[in-house]
Image (cartoon, rainbow, N blue to C red):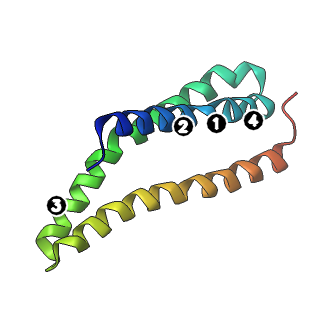
Amino acid sequence: MAPVWMLATFGALYNLWAIADSSVYSTALADVVPANRLGAAYSVRSAMGFGAGAISPWVFGLALDWGQVHFSLPGNAWILAWSTVGLGALLGPLMILRFEKLTKVEGPAR
């Protein structure tokens, strides 16, 4: 088990890195969304982000519990639970591809 100071340091760095890409997404959104829809676009983006952050621990726990009941080896339940995190992460590139298609069809917003 890691010392508390190491865990706290890692957690702080992780959170800094996680919010560092937020400005990139905000800028990209501002570049393609019409000015009269930008507030709505930001609110949808925030709601989706917070929603994913709220539901992901529940999905992880559900997968872990389900895996412990249905798999004979306890370690396999953890594989299933962590796989839900990977599946969620795969949605990112799919959304970027969808976003790219939308920007090519509609063209620049300004």
- Nearer the camera: disc 1 or disc 4: 1
Work out how far the residue at label 1 is from the one at label 2, CA to CA, in angstroms.
Answer: 6 Å
Query: Could you tell me the amino acid type at mark 1?
Result: Asp
- Circle 1 residue: 21
Q: Which mark is residue 39?
A: none
Work out how far the residue at label 4 is from the one at label 3, CA to CA, in angstroms.
Answer: 39 Å
Q: Secondary structure at mark 2?
A: helix
Residue 56 placement, left or right of 14: left
> Which badge, 3 or 2, comes first in the chain's sequence?
2
Work out how far the residue at label 4 is from the one at label 2, CA to CA, in angstroms.
Answer: 17 Å
Q: Are marks 1 and 2 in contact (CB under 8 Å)?
A: yes
Query: Could you tell me the amino acid type at mark 2?
Result: Ala
- Where residue 34 appears, as percent x and y from the top left, is 77, 27
Q: Secondary structure at mark 3?
A: helix
Q: Are marks 1 and 4 in contact (CB under 8 Å)?
A: no
- Nearer the camera: disc 3 or disc 1: 1
Q: Secondary structure at mark 4?
A: helix
- Circle 3 residue: 65
Neighbor class of circle 1 (other Cα within 10 Å; few <14, some 14-19, many 20+) is few
Give above or below for 60 relative to 31: below
Residue 55 placement, left or right of 33: left
- Circle 4 residue: 28
Neighbor class of circle 3 (other Cα within 10 Å; few <14, some 14-19, many 20+) is some
> Which badge, 4 or 3, comes first in the chain's sequence?
4
Residue 21, by quadrant, is top right
- Circle 2 residue: 18
Query: Could you tell me the amino acid type at mark 3?
Result: Asp
Give above or below for 95 relative to 82: above
